[in-house]
Each structure stands twice: as C-alpha cells, then as structure tokens.
Image (tube, rainbow, N blue to C red):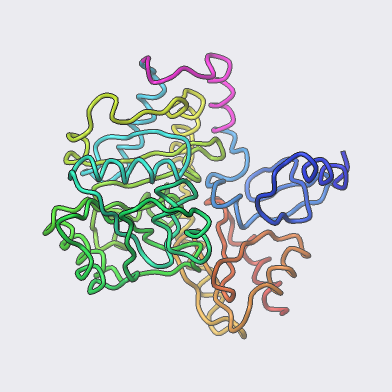
Amino acid sequence: MTFPHIKQNEDEFQLATYKKMPLAVERGLGSWVWTSDGEKYLDLYGGHAVCGTGHSHPHVVKAIKEQAERVLFYSNLVYSDIRGRAAEKLVSVAPAELIKAFFCNSGTEANENAMRMARMATGREKIVSFSGGFHGRTADSISATFLGKYRKIGEPNVPHHVEAEFGSIESIRAIIDSDTAGVIIEPIQSMAGMREASPEFFTELRAVCDKHGVVLIFDEVQTGVGRIGDWFFAGSEFANWVTPDIVTLAKSLGSGVPVGACLVNERVSSAIKENDLGTTFGGGMLAMAAVLATLEAIEADGMIANATAVEAHLRESLEGMQGVVALHGKGCLLGIEFDGPCTPIYSKLLEQKIITGTSSNPDVLRLLPPLCIAKTEIDWLLEVIREQ
C-alpha cells in the first residue's frame, strides 16, 4: 500500500494523537527503518526511546517467536517460568537494595503504581514532583507532571500533588512535611530538553527523604535499561551512588513489546500485601520473554559501553561547532542545544532521512537512538548539522 493510502486510512479511522512525520515505517533493523515507499532512514529517535536494542534485534525476535509458539499469555493467577526468570534477571542488574519487581504495561502505569505504593508504605497522601518533569498521561501521573500544557490536559487533577523546583534542595526542604508520602523525579528531564541536576542534589534529596520518612521514586522510564551508559541512573555515579526506594521502568525494557516495571526495596515490598496491586496483562509471558531477551542482548553486545562511547564521540565532535551551545544528557539520551530554534535543523535532518526529536525547549534537539548505534552513523548526523 502506498503512503497516501496508509495516511488516508489512519487519518480516517484513528483518533488524533501526535503530529506525525510524513512517512510510514514498514520494517526496521538495528538503527535503520524502511518506509512503505522503500526509503531508508537513520533512526536517532527510537520510537520515543523504545528501541533500545535496535529494531528487530535477532535475539529478541527469536525469544518472542519461541514464546508465542508455546503460550502467548496467562495472567498472574498462575506461576510462570519466563516471568520468574525475567524478574530475576532484572533484579540482578539493578542496585542491590532493589530486591523485587512488579510488572505492568507502560511507564505511566509504573508511575501510578509507584505513587500508590509510596502512599501504602507511609499512610500519607502528598506527592512531590518537579518543574519540567513528565510522568505520563494517566490520572496520578499527569497530576505529577509540571511541564507545559500536560497537567492542564489532565484536569481535574488528582489532589495532594505539589511542585518543587528541579535541582533545588531548598525548594524540597520547604515543601516536604509529615503528610508527604513520596517524591518522584525524572533524573534527566527528557521532554524538558534533557535538563540535569548535580550529583550532589541527589545525595541531599535522599537525606531529606530519609529524615522525613518519605519514599523516593526515580522515574527511569527513559533513563533506565542501559540508555545512559549504566543500567540505571539509580545507584550510579550520576546520582552520587544514591539508590531510591522505587525505580520505574518502561520504554526500551521490552525492545518494543509494551511492558513497564517497578523495582522496589525491602521497605516498600514489606508494605505490599496480596490484592494491593493488580494488572491483567502485566507480567504476561510474551512481554516477559521480550524483557529477558532485551537484557541479555544489551549485556551480550556490550551496548552500555557503546552508549558511553557514542556520547563521548558526539560530545567531542560538537565541541566548538558553530551554532551549538551545549550537549545535554548522557549515553544515548541526549539533547543538542542550539543558539536558536532547532526546528529548521530537525526538518533538514528529516529531509536527509535522519529521524530525531524535539522537546519543550525550542532550542534543544533530542537524540534517543538505539544503544547499538555506531559512531559512523552519528557522523552522518554531524555532517548535516555542520552544513546548517
């Protein structure tokens, strides 16, 4: 089917969501996708940071295919070997304090359950989140989002959500009190333009939460699963080795199969009883096969080290380049800040068959490529930017 027919079909029968690129993706491999018109694009956006292992990684495809031939799904009412193995593997690559996993279907669902667990563990109601943060579009998650128009879209918002200033420990100290259940933070604020806080901020944030008995949640829907050059922001040097009580995950966790997760410590897990949480599709066998294979592929192919190397290459190459102000973010979660709006550059890149993303900061171009991206592929991006 040609692109005009595909576009007409979607526009007629699908409710509007995002403003779409003028192309229809039919297949992908590694860092590349092919359209319905047979054109080849370099994908530096990864479908919203989802395709962490690259498009159709053979190990992940094989695992999904083999699982589909056995059983596609059964709920958490039964035990499952593949679910147990996926949970064991995920916990094994997490900081030692995070001892149990809860599987769900998306990042916003992971964040909803994380905030619910914080309230269960403390018996309190208030949730603190940060200016510029984005946590999803469901009720609690969008109420914890203080970025542009998004919180307003979710009105009427869930009560007991308050905003702190990102990176400001003084702001947190002024807000946290005896009614505060949890603090949720994106360690790197992707949609806000890859905003970062200092490592010392996370040390101080952990101390304030501990002082007041507050559950600390890292929303690692985008930073997690190897993307930043470590398995997680939690427990890494980027966080000054701080580990939160809960880490939420999704995006690249299943290499494109919808799946989310919460990783929790003993304090939180001991507060959760049977029937406190529930999900029909969370932990389904197909998703669990994808999770296990994704983690195995990242490990076997050295993708975490590659993400670090790619960042270093891009950072060095952009140094002193005309029009470039800074490179924000880490690993394969990056934002190039220009000295003016990046939309013309985004459009030129798409014209040259390179897919990137924008952000709420009009000057920041976002790069969320697969962790298998090669330096030579990044060089193509650099060549087009130099020509601007």
Name the image quarter holding the C terminus.
bottom right
Q: Is residue 71 magenta?
A: yes
Residue 315, compared with residue 107, is above or below; it is below
Of 258 and 387, nearer the camera is 258
Q: Is residue 73 magenta?
A: yes
| Residue at x 62% of width, y 85% of height | 322
Where residue 62 sits in the image (x, y, percent)? 57, 27
Drawn side of residue 282 relative to residue 356, left or right: left
Where residue 96 sits in the image (x, y, percent)? 22, 43
Residue 266, compared with residue 319, is above or below; it is above
Of 92 and 376, nearer the camera is 92
| Residue at x 39% of width, y 67% of height | 131
Where residue 80 sits in the image (x, y, percent)? 39, 18
Query: Across the whole image, how many numbered discs are drawn on residues?
Result: 0
Of 15 and 81, nearer the camera is 15
| Residue at x 22% of width, y 74% of height | 170
> Magenta residues, as a range?
60-78
Drawn side of residue 30 relative to residue 226, left or right: right
Drawn side of residue 333 relative to residue 168, left or right: right
Name the image quarter holding the N terminus.
top right
| Residue at x 32% of width, y 71% of height | 167
Q: Quadrant of residue 89?
A: top left
Q: Name the residue furthest front.
A: 156
Drawn side of residue 378 relative to residue 39, left or right: left
Where residue 123 sits in the image (x, y, percent)? 18, 43
